[in-house]
């Protein structure tokens, strides 16, 4: 294309924006026309400036990258590179729709590869094809959202000596398997629920509860510490000092739920 590629950077992290700016400034074909700190700024900039190329962070508070696309309309995007910290499983969606992305942290070589592809796409005026890909991605995400809007338990009904008691699920510290029962630990009190662990796990909100062992489900809000144990296992320490075993096969899942990163 004639002239420079007018480029917009969208990321809520100052360091991430700086890194992209430094890399882009090395390319004489690129003109950085603006930087946005959040989704709302991005929508305004895209509608006002009509950039040729957008580096779009997906995970932003309030309005994420997908919301930005939904607000401006995929047909107004000429070139796009997603910048994300998604795991490899989530990134399959971008691969399926042939959309390029940079997985944080990325190196100079991966950045250069993504930029070359974006330039070729812009040069070939593939905006219609890109719009269809982005629209398909948004439709897929909306479908997943509706599927994920599952009603999870908020209360449990417990029968005790002929009486019925309602227990708020959020009050449960952890659940322990006990044969065909689930033993609910609430403070120093326990309650038996005639339900198998697998069935109960499927009815608990995964944003609040996670299975750390085949026989233990724990409330994430109660976790205070994690300590290495034998054979690669870990010990999870709750706020009240109680210790639970974390199997090594479930450690990564727990760390992802707790949003733990290794320095």
Image: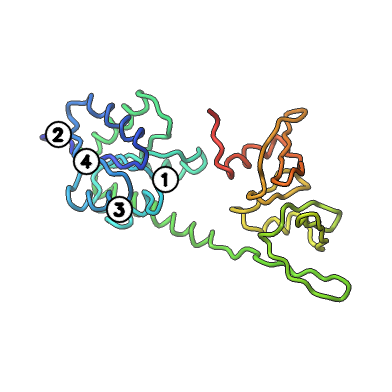
Question: Disc 4 marks which residue?
Answer: 34
Closer mark to the observer between disc 1 and disc 2: 1
**Local crowd size for mark 2, using a 10 Å CA cut-off: few (<14), some (14–19), many (≥20):** few
Question: Disc 2 marks which residue?
Answer: 4
Question: Disc 3 marks which residue?
Answer: 40
- Under circle 2, the secondary element is loop
Tag 3–tag 2 contact (CB < 8 Å): no
Question: Disc 1 marks which residue?
Answer: 59
Q: Going from the N terminus, do you reach mark 4 or mark 1 first?
A: 4
Image quadrant holding the N terminus, namely: top left
Taking the view exactly as shown, the residue that stands out farthest to the front is: 240
Q: Going from the N terminus, do you reach mark 4 or mark 3 first?
A: 4
Closer mark to the observer between disc 4 and disc 2: 4
Classify residue 203 by image quadrant. bottom right
**Local crowd size for mark 3, using a 10 Å CA cut-off: few (<14), some (14–19), many (≥20):** some
For image coordinates 43% across by 30% down, the residue present is 105
**Local crowd size for mark 4, using a 10 Å CA cut-off: few (<14), some (14–19), many (≥20):** some
């Amino acid at each position: 294309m004639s002239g420079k590629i007018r480029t917009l950077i969208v990321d809520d992290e100052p360091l991430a924006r700086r890194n992209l700016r430094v890399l882009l400034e090395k390319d004489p074909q690129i003109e950085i026309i603006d930087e946005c700190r959040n989704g709302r700024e991005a929508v305004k900039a895209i509608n006002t400036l009509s950039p040729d190329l957008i580096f779009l962070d997906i995970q932003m508070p309030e309005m994420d990258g997908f919301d930005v696309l939904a607000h401006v309309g995929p047909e107004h995007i000429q070139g796009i590179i997603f910048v994300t910290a998604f795991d490899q499983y989530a990134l399959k969606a971008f691969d399926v729709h042939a959309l390029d992305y940079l997985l944080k942290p990325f190196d100079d070589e991966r950045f250069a590869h993504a930029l070359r592809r974006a330039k070729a796409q812009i040069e070939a005026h593939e905006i219609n094809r890109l719009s269809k890909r982005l629209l398909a991605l948004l439709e897929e995400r909306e479908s997943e959202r509706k599927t994920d809007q599952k009603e999870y338990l908020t209360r449990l009904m417990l029968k005790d000596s002929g009486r019925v008691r309602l227990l708020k699920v959020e009050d449960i510290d952890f659940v322990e398997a006990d044969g065909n029962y689930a033993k609910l630990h609430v403070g120093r009190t326990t309650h038996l629920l005639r339900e198998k662990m697998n069935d109960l796990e499927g009815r608990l909100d995964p944003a609040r509860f996670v299975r750390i062992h085949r026989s233990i489900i724990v409330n994430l809000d109660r976790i205070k510490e994690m300590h290495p144990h034998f054979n690669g296992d870990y010990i999870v320490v709750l706020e009240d000092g109680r210790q639970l075993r974390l199997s090594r096969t479930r450690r990564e899942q727990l760390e992802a739920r707790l949003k733990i990163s290794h320095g």
